[in-house]
């Protein structure tokens, strides 16, 4: 019972983290939520895990739990990677804004302008 | 000219020669540099924009033909093609890689091109405004073509010359880069 509660709390935390990313990264966020929901289901229904494992040809329910956990971990890593890319887009926008706000035309043109008498 | 934190003297020489030099405060990549250059040109009222790579494989002499194609055919994008023009000193492996990129582009965008990764291209103001390059590194060439296809704006290919030197080959894309490009495009597709 204690293990079930601990795992459920962990999976709820995973689901909340994925839900927060759902707008930015809908596909991977959705995948994490589905995998975590399935994880919670087999935590509370271990007999079903064995039945489902047999159904898909895995053998033992414990192996199915392990596979689901690997899937959740991989999806979280992908979520983090995509989140990093999103941060990179923000940094790019900031760097571009800085670059565009400080553009000077070359010395040759400036010298020509200085030498051109004002009309 | 966009200086993406280069360590050579190009930016200084371009500045001395009278060019506008836009300097990125940090290295962002070729795709990001292109978008910065396009943004700068649009902010300064450009009616047409020409882009080309800085690895000396393109020839400035091809620019008039690209601009002429925009003017005379009324299209919004004139895309350079080394396979309609000349590809000097091209390796067989590179040629095969580029042909694979053409096939990939046809399958993913529907665009019928002879050259999919040519940095020499010209666009109208209207064309430039539909581009929003989010692929900072080498995947931008495929992303640009995806956005052109999505915009449904007209385009034409123009023969250009690409001259391969040992310098440009060292800077160019190899097979490992191609794998990175596909991964970056997949990552981009998973995001908004």
Image (cartoon, coloured by chain):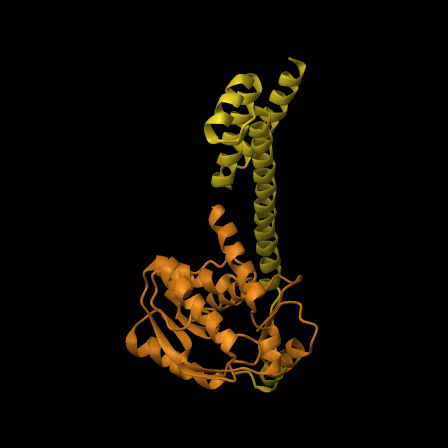
Find chain B in the image and tell me its colour: orange
Figure check: A89 above or below B64 = above
Q: Residue furthest right?
A: B7
Figure check: B41 above or below A79 = below
- Is B125 situated left or right of B31 in this image? left
Point out residue A48 in the picture as x, y percentages from the top left corner. Answer: 50, 19
Residue B181 seen in the current view = yes
What's the residue at 53%, 22% (across, down)? A50
Where the N terminus of chain B falls, by quadrant? bottom right
Where is residue A107, by image quadrant? bottom right
What's the residue at 57%, 64% (across, down)? B177
Residue B134 seen in the current view = no
Q: Nearer the viewer, residue B128 or A28?
A: A28
Point out residue B175 in the picture as x, y percentages from the top left corner. Answer: 55, 66
Point out residue B146 in the picture as x, y percentages from the top left corner. Answer: 41, 59
Q: Nearer the viewer, residue A94 or B69?
A: B69
Chain letter, colour yellow: A
Point out residue A108 in the picture as x, y percentages from the top left corner. Answer: 62, 83
Figure check: A18 above or below A91 = above
Figure check: A82 above or below A6 = below
What's the residue at 49%, 59% (across, down)? B133
Q: Residue furthest left?
A: B73
């Amino acid at each position: 019972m204690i293990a079930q509660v601990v795992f459920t709390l962990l999976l709820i935390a995973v689901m909340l983290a994925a839900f927060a990313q759902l707008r930015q990264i809908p596909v991977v966020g959705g995948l994490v939520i589905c995998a975590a929901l399935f994880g919670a289901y087999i935590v509370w229904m271990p007999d079903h895990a064995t039945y489902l494992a047999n159904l898909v040809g895995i053998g033992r329910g414990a192996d199915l739990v392990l596979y689901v956990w690997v899937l959740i971990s991989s999806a979280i890593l992908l979520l983090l990677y995509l989140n990093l890319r999103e941060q990179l887009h923000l940094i790019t926008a900031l760097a571009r804004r800085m670059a565009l706000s400080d553009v000077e035309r070359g010395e040759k043109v400036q010298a020509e302008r200085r030498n051109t008498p004002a009309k | 000219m966009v200086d993406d934190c280069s360590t050579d003297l190009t930016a200084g020489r371009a500045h001395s020669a009278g060019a506008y030099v836009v300097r990125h405060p940090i290295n962002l990549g070729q795709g990001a540099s292109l978008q910065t250059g396009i943004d700068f040109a649009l902010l300064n009222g450009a009616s047409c924009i020409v882009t080309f790579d800085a690895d000396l494989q393109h020839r400035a002499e091809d620019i008039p033909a690209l601009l002429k194609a925009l003017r005379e055919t009324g299209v919004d994008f004139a895309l350079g093609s080394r396979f309609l023009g000349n590809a000097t000193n091209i390796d067989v492996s590179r040629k095969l890689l580029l042909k694979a990129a053409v096939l990939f582009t046809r399958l993913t965008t529907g665009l019928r091109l002879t050259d999919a990764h040519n940095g020499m291209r010209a666009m109208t103001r209207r064309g430039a405004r539909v581009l929003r390059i989010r692929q900072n590194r080498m995947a931008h060439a495929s992303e640009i073509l995806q956005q052109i296809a999505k915009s449904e704006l007209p385009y034409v290919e123009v023969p250009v010359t690409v001259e391969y030197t040992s310098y440009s080959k060292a800077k160019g894309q190899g097979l490992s880069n191609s794998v990175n490009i596909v991964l970056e495009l997949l990552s981009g597709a998973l995001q908004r």
